[in-house]
Amino acid sequence: MKMADGSTILRRNRPGTKSKDFCRWPDEPLEEMDSTLAVQQYIQQLIKRDPSNVELILTMPEAQDEGVWKYEHLRQFCMELNGLAVRLQKECSPSTCTQMTATDQWIFLCAAHKTPKECPAIDYTRHTLDGAACLLNSNKYFPSRVSIKESSVTKLGSVCRRVYRIFSHAYFHHRRIFDEFEAETYLCHRFTHFVTKYNLMSKENLIVPINVGENAAPGESEA
Amino acid sequence: MGTNSGATAGINNKPVGGATGAGVLVGGGVGGANSSIGGVLSNSLGGGGGLSIGGLNAGGQNANVGGMGNVGGDDGGNGMVGGGVNNQQATTPQYTIPGILHFIQHEWSRFELERSQWDVDRAELQARIAMLLGERKCLESLKSDLTRRIKMLEYALRQERAKFYRLKYGTDPPQLNEFKPSNEDAGLAGEVATDSEVPYSSVSNTTWRQGRQMLRQYLAEIGYTDNIIDVRSNRVRSILGLNNNAEHDGSGGGLGGGLGGGTGGENLSPNINGNESNKRASETEGRHTPAKKVQQSIDEIIVDTEAAVMANFEFLGATEMSDDDEISDDLEMVATDNDDTDVKMAKRAKSGKDMLTEDLEADVGEQLLNDMNLMTEEVDGSLGLGELAQLTVNNESDGAYDANSKDGTGGSAGGAGYRKTWNAKYTLRSHFDGVRSLIFHPEEPVLITASEDHTLKLWNLQKTVQAKKSASLDVEPLYTFRAHTGPVLCLGMSSSGETCYSGGLDGNIECWQLPSPNIDPYDCYDPNVHSGTLEGHTDAVWGLTTMQSNIVSCSADGTVKLWSPYNKEPLLRTYTASEAEGAPSSVDFVRNEVDHIVVAYNSAHCIVYDTETGKQVVRLEAAQEMSGNTGKFINKVVSHPTLPITITAHEDRHIRFWDNTSGTLVHSMVAHLEPVTSLAVDAHGLYLLSGSHDCSIRLWNLDNKTCVQEITAHRKKFDESIFDVAFHATKPYIASAGADGLAKVFV
């Protein structure tokens, strides 16, 4: 990001940029972002700066449309969950995890099929993420990224419920992977905080033990 | 007139019948009645026009006829019976058997007569309904035709605007000079163009005439008599009355030079119309007068539309000018010179005339179309269609000559290949973040995208979902490739299309076996799709390209590596340049020279290596550009598929062309408003596609280095917009990938 020629800062990742310099540019205030993707830019900027500062990341700027704010956050969650899926692919195989479970209480059925199916955990994970990608990019439900229909906002809750099961499966069956991933990204922490704050999931479904109130302070020990 | 004479004929019959039928009064009365029926029937069949009234009159007279018969009997009171009957009637209203019989017979014949009358009326009205229905239908089709025309014209206008924009933009003055003659040719080519279209109309004439004849035969076969067809043709002729005049005045009156071109092609039609009307010789004076009135109003309309069209074009002209100025400033190009504006004016005037002609032709065509749909006046009808066909061709060639077809006169076929315009057809939305790279399958309509959201996705363009209310199709991904732990930056595909490689910010190159393009998107996870990881780079892999079974990659760690992916030792060789060159940013195989690769470095130099020896073969640098290389950073380097030319995309908005043998700069041009990020050359080496952070992709003719088309395709995220562009090797697809998380495919 040696790009401060003159007075204007160009926020670009040129070919040849080292990975440590990727997206490493001075923060741009949200007010100055004139792109339709401003909210995504803003959220990614906050995460880049400090992924552990969940409270700040989830603090909605003033005059921000709440639907868009929730939508963009959920996009970011699904995107980062790809990282967890990549790790799970190495360990979670259909032979070891034949069903999508967390605790023994529930078997989750995969909603990606015409009739919900008892997919192995890894398939459930992939299908859920693929389905969420299709839904959240659907021209029908989410044609715009600057305003969201009220009817589409209700879809966000079901996406949240489904993707949360990936966290819970990882936590209860692949704890090592979960801990490593969480230490890097604070993703489950942020997600729990997010769904609680915006009331997208009921508390009894949040089975991964993360105390939201307590961990709001920095320096939580996840692993 | 006809009805009257018929009625009188019937009445005349009666006294005769009465006189001859002397004693047999009943017979005489019946006979009279019969004959009167005959008279009325013949009347109504022969009558045509106002038949319903004629029929009623005849009915009224029928009653008289009966009375007449009686009177006739009275006068010729030869027979006793007749006299007796008469007396009875005069003195007492006594009912006698013969009298009742006579009365009943008379009534019966009257009813019969009336019934036949009604039948005739009914047939008449049915014919009328059919005719009106036909009229309605043809008006409807006319309406749809006109809306289609409007759309056509709108489209042509859009093309025109795009053309002016393009014409001034991204072309150097010498090329502009080249354009001028061609434009003028096109401008003058009005008559030539219409000449060349004559075959069209004649062809359609004959085919339509044949079709018309056949239809007539069929109608005759199913008993549609000539009489009924004639009823229609009367009607049609009344329309034609207008038509003839309008056309004569249109071509003869001379609304302007441009009009001459338009109507010149159809000067057949007035002649034929004239002949027709002579033959029929049925046009009355009364018809001509209203026709002329209407014609006047048509003239008025034309004048109005002329004014409107001209006004429109004034406005257009103004905007074009301002656009041009801005752009040429932006591009630091030579400003518009006078000659150029002249061309523009000429063109504008020309198209103004075209519009005018078309307006008139639309009017004329409207009526001709009427005829055609009534299926009576074959010649005129077919001419009407011929004109419409011509107009379509006209429009096409209008839209065409913007694609700087030098043979503006050569007709549409010549320019066809030249003016392919690409339109967005498929939108690939499923990535959560910017799409960094995309690559087509060498044969199938299949492509793979790589995104900063850590995934790659496989798309089959034949499996689409119709997006609502839009012309573009949405495609859903078939497969998501997950293995990278960071943004995926570059892609390569084997020439067989079976294997694909991706390089990521995590420094790994992943190898993938492509799943079938018909796979179920929610199939079970097959770990074998991910067929290996090439580890060796210690920093982000930014460039990757394939040649036969080998791939070459460049990385931010400063190295370029040659791999043979499925060898035991996949890494074949590493090429490192001096520190001063900085990190490589892009790499490509030199396509016309085996074992050579060209690498672009941060220093804005390109180096061609021999892959076998690892030695530098050529350094691509221009002496005069040595000073201040800072802004000239190379974003992408590609090798021409057949010629020893390397093409580079620069941060300073330029595209530069280099000679691989001498290492010198061949050509340099400002190509975009912002840094050029991506390049692709089509398989034949004729066209170059470039993408830029200015949100647009541009298609360049490599022959004369002019921009053929510009498409605004993506939105910005931070200061980035378009990351990659691609050509399909064997199918007419181009694609672009953007920071907005979308990929678009154009056809």
Image (cartoon, rainbow, N blue to C red):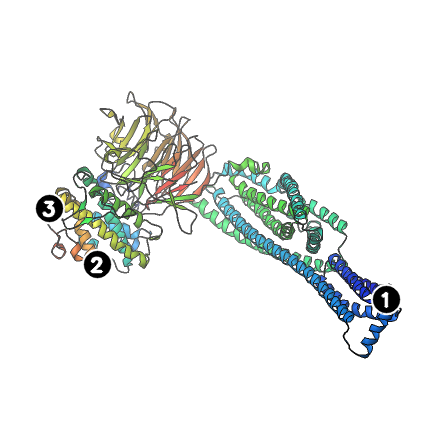
The residue under label 2 is A199
Q: Quadrant of the N terminus of chain B?
A: bottom right
Up the image or down, B310 lies above or below A17; here it is below
- The residue closer to the viewer here, B15 or B217, is B15
Up the image or down, B302 lies above or below B480; here it is below
Please tell me whether mark 2 or mark 1 is closer to you in this view.
Answer: 1
Image coords of residue A38 (percent x, y): 30, 52
Res. A94 image quadrant: top left
Image coords of residue B611 (percent x, y): 30, 23
The residue under label 1 is B23
At label 1, counting other C-alpha atoms closer than 10 Å, the crowd grade (few under 14, some 14-19, many 20 or more) is some
Q: Measure the alpha-carbon separation of dots 2 and 1.
A: 113 Å
Q: Are marks 1 and 3 on the same chain?
A: no
Q: Measure the alpha-carbon separation of dots 1 and 3.
A: 133 Å
Res. B135 image quadrant: bottom right
- The residue closer to the viewer here, B329 or B124, is B124
Q: Amino acid at mark 2?
A: Asn
Is residue B537 visible to the viewer in this orientation of the structure?
A: yes
Q: Amino acid at mark 3?
A: Ala
Q: Are marks 3 and 2 on the same chain?
A: yes
Is residue A73 visible to the viewer in this orientation of the structure?
A: no
Q: Measure the alpha-carbon separation of dots 3 and 2.
A: 26 Å
The residue under label 3 is A223
- The residue closer to the viewer here, A3 or B513, is B513
Q: Are marks 2 and 1 on the same chain?
A: no
What is the secondary structure assignment of the residue under circle 2? loop
**Earlier-in-chain disc, 3 versus 2:** 2
Which chain is indicated by disc 2?
A
